[in-house]
Image: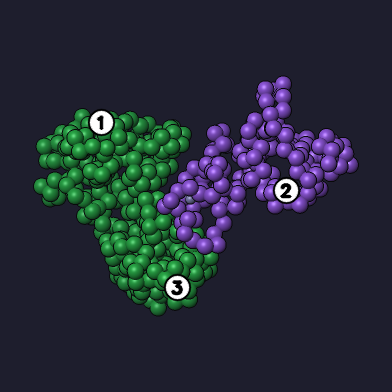
Amino acid sequence: MRHLIDIRDLAQGEIVSLLDLADGIFAHPEDYREACRYKKLATLFFEPSTRTRLSFEAAMMELGGKVLGFSEAASSSASKGESVSDTVRVVGCYADVIAMRHPKEGAPLAASLRSTVPIINAGDGGHNHPTQTLTDLMTIRREKGSLDNFTIGLCGDLKFGRTVHSLIAALTRCEGVRFVCISPEELRLPGYVRQDVLAKSGAQFAEVRDLAEVMPELDVLYMTRVQRERFFNEEDYLRLKDSYILTPAKLESAKRSLAILHPLPRVNEIDTAIDDDPRACYFRQALYGKFVRMALILKLLEEAGK
Amino acid sequence: MNIDSIKNGLVIDHIRAGGAMDLYRLLHLGDMDCTVAIIKNAPSAKLGRKDIIKIDSPKDIDLGVIGFVDPDATVNVIRDGKLADKRKLDLPERIVNVLKCRNPRCITTVEPGLDQVFFLSDKATHTYRCLYCEARAELNKNK
Ligand SMILES: [Zn+2]
């Protein structure tokens, strides 16, 4: 049984073929309206994440399939102490594929060991979120035309932001991607990502403190949230937070072709005045997320049917 | 038992001084009904001081964890009172149900019946990570 627990479960060629399929669905959604007819997706959300759940549900609906599930642990058997392994074995009797979100790291992997239907990890705590990474990759490829040979700035909380870590891991498998990591000292990339992933891959990378100074070099800018509670004291937070907020003034020195991404939700790290700039991709990114999930559901169901 | 003469069994030698009790616990030697001898702080030309464990049992013991805990330890296999085999330990690819994951956000802390699995993630630094959450393996001395 094939699952998607970690983006590293997919070979580079498989990622490319998923993105190709997602592009194909995007271009001709009408061809896929019946693709999952009589199939059911269970969304097991042991912790709420409305936008991820809606994206999965919309994806299945547009494939002609049906959706069932729960949106928080309180309304599931987990509140009665059932293990995730038992839960998926039961749900596997009712649904053909499962999207699972869980606050505990590794829960979808534990579930997949016993599941009779494909499991998609829809986020396990701060650990993995592979469909976000697929969404990011699809966005970059559609906006830039390729996943090779560009400079990406990753800005904000690079220490705890796991979407950033898996995006870096995925992009180091592409050709000629240069990384510029922009964060306060306190929120630098963890050593193991810098050493085990970036340095080991031989990719070019730099670490800087200020977004404005590197803006002209960037082809892609991936913004993340800088959370107040990550700082030791209020003073540091107030001193630093403005360096990591994207404003129209900072964007003046940027390339005309820049693509600005954000996994959403945003708080204030991107000024809303930028939303209408053609370089702002984050709402299109949310749209692409649905198409890449459609491609993934199709692929996993196809493999499970073999 | 005469600790110098084992008939059939194992001698784990060159254990870093003070490490014998960790190994005793991790290898579940307390659960075995054979004779087990622990020698602490023996003089060693190589290490200054070392610990030694002698196990008087022909039973097979999963020794994989030794490579993780103490990569310099050696294992002597004794058969019919003679040294039959002497080997350095390789790092096992996986360590199952020996160490506990210490990440409080890990699924292994709540899910019943789940094997505690650690995989070798970096040979050079002897780093093992939890299969589920990827937290680094650490020895829990208190357990
Ligand atoms: Zn763990």
Q: Amino acid at mark 2?
A: Ile
Quick check: is the Cβ at mark 1 less than 8 Å away from ligand 1? no
Q: Amino acid at mark 3?
A: Val
Residue A251, compared with residue A266, is above or below; it is above
| Residue that badge 3 annotates | A91
| Residue that badge 1 annotates | A209
Q: Colour of chain A?
A: green
Picture coordinates of residue B45 (x, y %)? 72, 21
**Color encoding of the figure:** by chain
Q: Residue A302, which numbered label?
A: none
Q: Residue B61, which numbered label?
A: 2
Indicate which label's residue lies in the foreground, 2 or 3. Answer: 2
Could you give the CA–CA distance between mark 3 and mark 1, rounded to whole angstroms? 47 Å
Q: Quadrant of residue A62?
A: bottom left
User: Closer to the camera, B19 or A61?
Assistant: B19
Tell me the element at label 3. helix
User: Closer to the camera, A236 or A284?
Assistant: A236
Residue positioned 22% across, 41% down in the render: A258
Judge the density around disc 1: few (<14), some (14-19), many (≥20) Cα neighbours within 10 Å.
some
In the image: residue B71, left or right of residue A304? right
- Mark 1 chain: A
